[in-house]
Amino acid sequence: MKGRYFAFHPGLCVLLIPLGAIGYKNGAPCARCPRNAHCTNATFCRCDPGFTSLSGKVIFSTSSEVCTDINECGPPLYMSCGSLARCHNVEGSYYCECAPGHELLSGGTKFQSKKENTCQEVLFSWTSPSGVKSQSLSRFFDKVQQLSQDFKPALAKNTIQDLVEEIDELLETPGDLETLPPSEQHCVASHLLIGLEDVLRGLSKFLPNGPLTVHAPAGTELSLKVQEQGIGDVTVGQSQAKMQLNWDVAQKSSNLGPSVVGLISTPGMSKLLGEVPLVLEPKQQEAVHEHKGLLEEVSPVLLSDVISAFISNKDTQSLSSPVTFIFSHHSVTPWPTQKVLCVFWERGQDGCGHWSTTGCRTVATRDASTTCECTHLSSFAILMGHDDMQQEDPVLVVITYVGLGLSLLCLLLAALTFLLCKAIQNTSTSLHLQLSICLFLAHLLFLTAIDQTKIKVLCAIIAGALHYLYLAAFTWMLLEGLHLFLTARNLTVVNYSSMSRFMTKIMFPVGYGVPALIVAISAASRPHLYGTPARCWLHTDRGFIWTFLGPVCTIFSINWAFFLMTFWIVKSKLSSISSDVSTLQNTRMLTFKATAQLLILGCTWCLGILQVGPAAHVMAYLFTIINSLQGVFIFLVYCLLSKQVREQYRKWFRGVRKSKAESEKYTLSSGTMSDASKHSVENYNEQLTLENLSLRK
């Protein structure tokens, strides 16, 4: 029996361990007690404080008893923590905690009984954001806590003045805040904007009726009004912004006390809001995704100070009537692809945020002021953003398609003329031919693929091809300017001069190699800037468009220098009678044609750059009309106005007419012969018929 007992005992212990542990108190052995219980008198068990047995017995001896937690915060005890506090039950105990927005006189929030309750409303429940390490921010919140401890309702105005100066000083000299990553800076800015609204709302209720204005040294301004049962509209204004709303919006529905309307402008907040993304209104965002592919994040430009609006009513997400804001900002002239936007700061779930246009609309905008209407309150600003959703002018679209269609036809005819007309083939004609080919391909690609933005990679390839083809066209125009200058300087027969051999050697490597090098460097450095949500062209972000405009402006300037020197040479040669007259006449004609080409190809792009300000609409029409007819002008100047080409056209037309006449003559003679044969056959048949009749008789 003894052996069997000890053989069985280890298995039994294993089964008993989950049910309870052997209790030991003060190192003395005791009866087996369940969990959350202790030994009493070395033979009995008692549940620990905060626990009770299921059987209701205070002292028990069975190890099968279970001790459960006593809920001091529920029935039947309902432990009272006093006013402005809540009871929290924990295993074996409980604690009291001040309600949100309140704290003990000692600064803590937790206590044990109603007798220890000294909870009061916290005016400065504003602490440093978690996870951000900044000495400047820590010093600021230390000063805020000191203001909270020293606060007295009778001195609320002084406290507000001190708070505005502290936030002004922090934003003027942010110190190590500027070294934080942009994402952390955005979180800090969000924390400051929202916290400042709440604190000012709480302090304003201690102010007497009437207006209050506070100016800080670095430009932070506060304007507010307090009024008992305000009626009608109210306007709160400062140097950079004004807010207009109805008093009913500001008044709490359940509060009959005074109403508060306030506006604070923080110009230094822009230092923490660099590269903040802009989120469009849902309808606009859906339209962009539907028609233009994926919406790319574009960092807008902040034009105005950041202002924060607050009222005594905390429920400001859906106001009964809209609030009007009038901003003063830097004088700006938007480009055609830019737009002035009214935005607000929307806080995200992670505590950070972004600019958004939801619930706000731009009523009117001028050079230095913008009027907005919003159906909610927050922090607001005026941004200059990219307007990829702007509607196209249908007249400009028609002009573009008709003009480019004519240009494609004329460029094709011009290229065939330069290629097939042997009488005019020389170095200059080769330059014209390459220019016509580049423009033909560029216009054809523009006409058929500029809007193919659904596939991002394909759109980037199209943008790169357009970049290359248009740069190649301008490079060939530069070579024409150089060729014209060398021709005027030498005044020799172009085809057999050393200058002609020099041009022949360099024109293809330069004409096609230089644009390829520019595009390769641009694509290698910033490939993501090829293609936009609206069209397959270069992005305007970070000055990337200047990878095209820079070479174009350089070529345009160099060509002007070539032409001025050419005109000077021609003018000096005209004064010399001994000069070869035919050579001079050819050079003068070449100068005229090249000048016309420079005006057609160069000045049209200058009109595109000048599409700003009040004249932007007119410049857009001029740019579209002239630029879409480039091929027509090239065909007119280099083909129809050329005597040799006209003579060649006459030869071709005479040859065509002669061939047509011979064809008609051959057809006519063939018809006459067939008619004669037909008549002879008919006569022969009649004769045979008569002979047969006579034989029968």
Image (cartoon, rainbow, N blue to C red):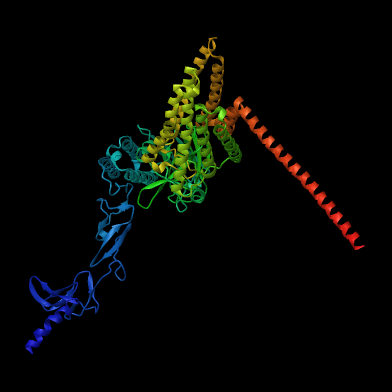
Q: What number of labels is visible?
A: 0
Q: Can residue 467 be seen in this view?
A: yes
Instruction: Identify the residue shown where x is 31% and y is 35%.
Output: 169
Q: Is residue 330 left or right of residue 391?
A: left
**Residue 62 sits above or below residue 447 on the image:** below
**Residue 505 sits above or below residue 88 on the image:** above
**Residue 476 sits above or below residue 147 on the image:** above
**Location of the N terminus (image quadrant):** bottom left
Quarter assignment of residue 38 = bottom left
> Between 577 and 561, which is closer to the camera in this rendering?
577
| Residue 540 percent location from the top left of the image | 44, 38
| Residue 79 percent location from the top left of the image | 29, 65
> Between 662 and 533, which is closer to the camera in this rendering?
662
| Residue 158 percent location from the top left of the image | 34, 38
**Residue 488 sits above or below residue 437 on the image:** above
Instruction: Identify the residue shown where x is 22% and y is 71%.
Output: 51
> Between 313 and 586, which is closer to the camera in this rendering?
586
**Location of the C terminus (image quadrant):** bottom right
| Residue 327 percent location from the top left of the image | 47, 36
Q: Is residue 27 left or right of residue 332?
A: left
Q: Is residue 560 visible?
A: no
Residue situated furthest bottom in the rendering = 1
